[in-house]
Amino acid sequence: MRAVTGLKEVAERAGVSMRTVSNVVRGTGRFSEATRERVLRAVEELGYRPNTAARRLRTGRSGVLLLAVPELTMPYWAELAEHLLREAAAHGCTLLVEVTGGRPEAELEIALGRTDPLVDGVILSPLALDDRAAVRAPEPTPLVLLGERVHDLPCPHVTVDNTGAARGATAHLLARGRRRIAVVGRQSAPHAATSATRLTGHRQALEAAGLAYDETLAPPVAAYHRADGAAAAHALLDLPEPPDAVFCFADTLAEGVLHAARERGLSVPGDLAVVGFDDIEAARYTAPPLTTVAPDKRELARLAVTALLEGVDGVRATRPRVLSAGHRLVVRESG
């Protein structure tokens, strides 16, 4: 039987004191980022988890957090969940993961705190959350929101500058001499914030270059899956004057566009430049490797968990606050 790992083993592995391990796990005291990284690595390697029952008796808190996302089949959410799991572990917390399917009723139940009573706080990425209904919770569970849509709720919202990132992606294609730039990812649903914010940035870049936005170059998509990207690409390539570049609002859409280009015998980026968004692991291995916007997923996780634990500790925001993580454009061979 494997021995239970405690603070002592983690401290020995990290080369620090047990007090330092305790401080890092609880997010208290002073320590360098390098020390935090060593402790986090040791926590992960040894599989250390604090005693939840003992903690609840001592502090009234379980150290259990909940992450609720629309789906985990999308690589972006799976990768971000991994970062959140690591960040929670660094604070000595356990992170449960739940899939909402983007259903408004499921998102509302979670936002109202109707979850396992063991859960101290929730990180929620909603697609169709009703703010007016969610704000009615009499004693809400500490909540942090993830995603592009800024909600009218008194809780932290963690995001990236989607408009700025999209503007930069389109500007990159313009700088490469592309002038007929399509977008794949436009949606018209009321809460389609990913589409709205990224389309705004795309249009700003076109306007700055003196080009008009043409909605025939922005076919609607039902979802952000590979099949949706491929179908949109075929529609674009069937136009009398097809595009010379495509900016996709997700890497999975870009994978579908690349597949459609191969089926048509087109060269990328020669005939068609392609840029994605998310920098999922697969983006490095597409043919050709995908140029894409890379949100700082690690920083998103750090901001979300830190903000949630502040809420758990009673540090409540008096008004909504938006916490923005960084992003960068990773230029590879597709455009």
Image (cartoon, rainbow, N blue to C red):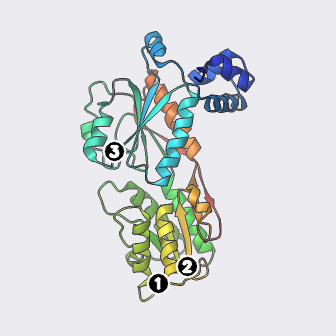
Kind of residue at disc 3: Thr
Q: Earlier in the sequence, mark 3 or mark 2?
A: 3
Kind of residue at disc 1: Pro
Residue at the far bottom in the pictured view:
240
Q: Earlier in the sequence, mark 1 or mark 3?
A: 3
Disc number placed over residue 272 in the picture, else none: 2
Q: Residues within 10 Å of mark 2 (few under 14, many from 20)?
A: many
Query: Dot 1 lies on which element?
Result: loop
Disc number placed over residue 100 in the picture, else none: 3
**Image point (32%, 30%), residue name:** 115
Seen from the viewer's position, the closer of residues 62 and 154 is 62
Viewport quadrant of the C terminus: bottom right
Q: State whether residue 74 is above or below residue 107.
A: below
Q: State whether residue 284 is above or below residue 264.
A: above
Label 2 close to label 1 by CB (< 8 Å): yes
Can residue 265 be seen from the camera position used here? yes
The residue carrying mark 1 is 242
Q: State whether residue 320 is above or below residue 61.
A: below
Query: Dot 3 lies on which element?
Result: loop
